Amino acid sequence: MTAMYVCICRAVSERRVVQAVAEGATTLQELRARTGLGTGCGKCVPQAYQVLREELERRQSPAAHHEIAARAG
Ligand code: FES
């Protein structure tokens, strides 16, 4: 599996963002503090925000995902 980098400047992968959310990060500021993401050129911030939001949503509604998976199967 290849690492999908969200932040090239600080070599922060999407997996690392997901891990940071699992560790308790809920804001871009917390992600930045934990990973250094966005502290270089700053171009990754919109993408990082999207990954953060998607991961938070995924974590808030695991039942919905099970339901979708059940319907698909
Ligand atoms: S790509 Fe993240 S700070 Fe430059």
Image: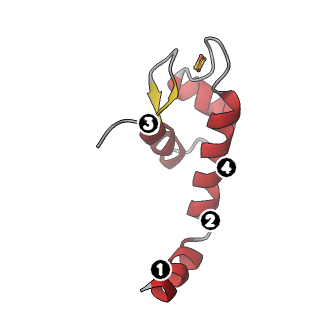
Label 1 – label 3 distance at C-alpha: 24 Å
Q: Which residue is mark 4?
A: 53
Q: Nearer the viewer, residue 49 or 23?
A: 49
Q: Tell which tag, 1 or 2, sits nearer the viewer.
A: 1
Label 2 – label 4 distance at C-alpha: 10 Å
Q: Are marks 2 and 4 in contact (CB under 8 Å)?
A: no
Lower position in the chain sequence, tag 4 or tag 3: 3
Label 1 – label 2 distance at C-alpha: 16 Å
Q: Are marks 1 and 2 in contact (CB under 8 Å)?
A: no
Query: What label sits on residue 60 in the rendered view?
Result: 2
Which residue type does callout 4 highlight? Answer: Arg
Ligand 1 picture quarter = top right
Label 2 – label 3 distance at C-alpha: 23 Å
Q: Position of residue 62 (x, y in %)?
A: 54, 72
Label 4 – label 3 distance at C-alpha: 17 Å
Mark 1: give few (<14), some (14-19) or many (20+) Cα within 10 Å.
Answer: few
Q: Which residue is mark 3?
A: 4
Left/right placement of residue 55 relative to residue 23 reads: right
Q: Tell which tag, 2 or 4, sits nearer the viewer.
A: 4
Disc 3 within 8 angstroms of ligand 1 (CB): no
Q: Which residue is mark 1?
A: 69
The residue shown at (44%, 21%) is 11
Lower position in the chain sequence, tag 2 or tag 3: 3
Q: Are marks 1 and 4 in contact (CB under 8 Å)?
A: no
Lower position in the chain sequence, tag 2 or tag 4: 4
Disc 1 within 8 angstroms of ligand 1 (CB): no
Which residue type does callout 3 highlight? Answer: Met
Query: What label sits on residue 38 in the rendered view?
Result: none
Q: Quadrant of residue 56?
A: bottom right
